[in-house]
Amino acid sequence: MSKLTKVASLVSIPVMASMLAACGGNGGSEGGASGESSGQPKVKLTMIESLSSPKRTEFLKQAIGEFEAQNPGITVELITPPLESADSKINQMFSAKQTLDVVEVRDVTVKQFVNNGYLEKLDSYAANWPDFSTLTASALTMAKDIDNTVYYIPYGIYQRQLFYRKDLFDAKGLSAPKTWEELYEVGKKLTDPAQNKYGYSFRGGSGAEQYITQIVQDYNGANVNPSDSVFNKDGSNIFSTPGAVEALELYKKIYKEISPPDSANWAFSEQVQGFTSGTTAMLIQDPDTIETVASSLEEGQWATAPLPTGPEGVSHFVLGSAGWGMTSYSEHKEEAWKLISFLSSPEQNLKFAKTSGVIPIHTTASEDEFFKTGAYAPYIQMAQEPDKYVGVKPFTNYKGYALYKQNGIEKGQAFIFGKISAQDLAKEFSDFWNKEKAQQQS
Amino acid sequence: MRGKAYAAERAVRLLVMAVYLVVMVFPLYWMLITSLKPQKDIFSLPIYYWPKTFTLANYENIFKITKFHVYIFNSVIVSLSAAVIVLAVATLSSYVLARHKFRGSGQIMFFFFLTQVIPAFIGFAPLYLMLSKMNLVNTTQGLILIYTVMGIPFSTIMLKGFFQRVPSSLEEAAQIDGCSRLGALIRVILPVMLPGLSATFIFSFVQNWNELFFSVIVINSEHLKTIPVAMNSFITKFDVDWGSMSAATVLSVIPTMILFALCQRLIVQGLTQGAEKG
Amino acid sequence: MNGSDRSVPAVIDKPRNSRSAIWFIAGCLAPAVLLVLVFTYYPMLRGVTMAFQNYTLFDLSDARFVGFGNFKEILDNPQFITALKNSVYWVFFSLICQFVLGFGIALLLKNRFFGRGFYQGMIFFPWAMSGFLIGLIWRWLYNGQIGVINNLLIKIGLIDTPIPFLSSPKWGMFAVITANVWYGIAFFAIMLLAALQSVPEEISEAAEVDGANRLQRLFRITIPYIMPTILTTVILRIIWIMNFPDLIYAMTNGGPAGSTHILATYMMDKIIFGGDYGKASAVGVVMMVVLVLFMVFYFAAARREKAGDF
């Protein structure tokens, strides 16, 4: 009997402790203003990030610290969910109208947030914001991505370029490929499966649709409509042209002949690791990869170059972006805007861009040496030839994009494994997008 | 002749068991040595099956970059509390289901069995809304509530088997001695049931200890996060931070292993009793 | 349900059942039944209604009822059929291997030997980790470039170049099933060991005297004796394995080309790609219907054989 009472008393301690612990934590969920003894109401903002990384979170906390010092009446709580589940958590919180004031909005989530009425229109705030006028054209395009209305202020632009192993290229007397065809030929020379060496870091897993889209766009040349980039200026969609089939055949050849067999199911991390570990000699990725590559490979071992082009000499890059938005139901909109505009100021944004490897949003940043030289240099070069390197808006505003993303993996893999032909794949995607377009217009 | 065959059989048996142990333990071994490797050696080729240099840097790191001690505390509180409540609730329900045959008792068992069939995803969004209305989002109690509800059906099924093994003459005698029904249960039956109870307890504790999905969505604040959420955060865009992940794995497995070790005799004894009736 | 247990009209196990007994039964059942009813069944029913709605996060204002539209669409999709077939493979092979190996280990562990306690402790170990973490670890072990398994196979000389276990439709299911077997053996080993230890020595000895050899004793005496445990653990495992997306999700994400999707991961995919809760719920409902039908047949068969305790 005494044994039992001992057990009972032992277990009751954690139960009680949990009550206490939970009471302490309760303030967080209720949020909002809490009266201070001085009578000065202190406003509490809640902010949630999505594309978090330990380094970035640390930077944000520091920036928030500065903001709080400048605005003694405001405190900010930063919520940092694990990367993989962040967006679904944000959605859950939205659907229950949980306290949130500032939220990380991504090109892939903005349309859905707007549809559901979660985001506040920021046009009137931006109109009175002096720094708005110095936004780059790309940043402005993405800020107004949906309905030509500012729903978020981007914190940076993601834009791809080519990374290559300069040492391996030099040893064979090769130079960075200018076209997809050249990429394949150069890669062929660098591939030696027996040594586990391959030309290219293929991506057949999550995110494959971006690479399929890119090469197909390039094979549609100057015809692609930059603001609706799965369609051409003549109204046809990019998968309906003969170029699309040609592009897909090359895409398959690139996998079969110059990429690791494993890469059929590679997603971002494997793709980058393939390059940094020395298995592959070429990689097409965003600027946030620069730092990882720099820390894994020696200087002089690698370099960057503009993206390969299609047969007409035109290349397309997607303007990827993410930034800070405000919830439509925030109770502290003035304060929330203060935080957003603080984080988006040229000074803060420049620091943020360097930390997280994105292209800064203000034109003033182009003066910065950091973005003019070294691994960032191809971006300047690409910007100087806008007819050759065409920036296009992602078409994530279609309802079917998510399904396209899934099919990019599943159908894309079926294609490279030879289960369906290039014609079939092109036809399938072509029909898919025509249907999406019709649905969107109705 | 017989002796020789016996020796051969023993050798085969030992061999099979050794192979099984190696296969079973290898992933744990791999986590352990990874956690003791310096960051740069973790993915080095050729693969080292024994660390070239030992370091505790990964362990120091997880306490430095995260509030790992806080997460451990939270996990202990949440897992223990929910397991205790589950035990109390399931003891009552399984006891009457084992002891009394009444109309609907079969259906109630089926009612508990059926919960196992429900995919966690399907009810999740409505459940979150309920928690939100009850102001339980981002609280330890909210998580305890969910884990309790998740644990009750299986524990009831398992404990019912244990109760059926205990002869009912025990509490009949106690009731004759003037104990109430509840009194008889607490004073006479439970002590006999200790092994079965601890087996059930540990099962639900471990389940709570490892739960990731609900914890990620329900908890926002850093100071309320549990270990699995923290570990999930070691998956970054670029790679899995295996240095931190392996160290956290080792640390998170230790408490459950200790619990197993402490209660092992009780568990095996308990399962032995319950096993006959499943 | 809460109504039915309060209004149980007659409690008829013993003559001394009285009003107080009814109250005792109701009081003991109420907390468990109510909690599960409110926090499991109610949200589930709400979730099930989504299966009949056009419920996607992309535009929640358009969440109209579409009847069986979601079901039609998923059943028309060849990917769903693949996932359904894979679910059968996944459950069947995982279960058979886990059961046979777990039973074997349990038989070996039945006799006392030096270090048995330690050994038992070590085989508990996979239980101490989450399915997701196990998936991550096995993904690393199976990796084509830096994975230990390929490295070992090359060292032994079985293969020359790494096998892309997780990136080839040929090997994908094999890889995830072996990982699942590794995870699940412990459950059967422990449960069946406990059951074996409850078999009275006398029965077995009597059979030995009658001249039955060991295999005969195993099938004629031991297995029938522990049948209730086998039946309960098997049905629980079938349900759990079917409902266990974590491992596959972490290892292959259902790929390549959807070749390792089971219904549970297929359902997750519907939510992750585009937040299509309507179709995800429809997949979930199909899964539940399949399992419930299976369960009903299983219980009926067990009852007919008077083998189980259901």
Image: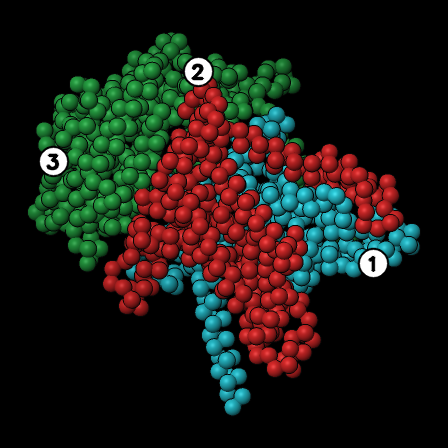
Question: Please, what is the three-letter code of the amino acid marked with disc 1?
Answer: Leu
Which residue, given by chain and number where applicable, does mark 3 sit on? A178
Residue A120 tag number: 2
Label number found at residue B170:
1
Mark 1: give few (<14), some (14-19) or many (20+) Cα within 10 Å: some
Residue A141: x and y in percent read 28, 18
Kindly identify which chain the residue marked by label 1 belongs to.
Answer: B
> Which chain: cyan?
B
Residue at horizontal 64 percent and vertical 42 percent from the top: B111
Residue at horizontal 35%, vertical 52%?
Answer: C172
Chain A colour?
A: green
Is B182 in front, or is A110?
B182
Indicate the colour of chain C. Answer: red
- Image position, residue C127 (x, y; %): 54, 55
In the image, what residue occupies the spot 42% across and 57% down? C178
Tell whether label 3 touches label 2 (CB within 8 Å).
no
Where disc 1 sits, the SS reads helix
Is B261 rendered above or below residue B40?
below
Residue A123 x/y as whole percent: 38, 11
Q: Nearer the viewer, residue B29 or B85?
A: B85
Taking the view exactly as shown, the residue that stands out farthest to the bottom is B1
Q: Name the mark nearer the viewer: 1 or 3.
A: 1
Pointer 2: residues within 10 angstroms few (<14), some, or many (20+)?
some
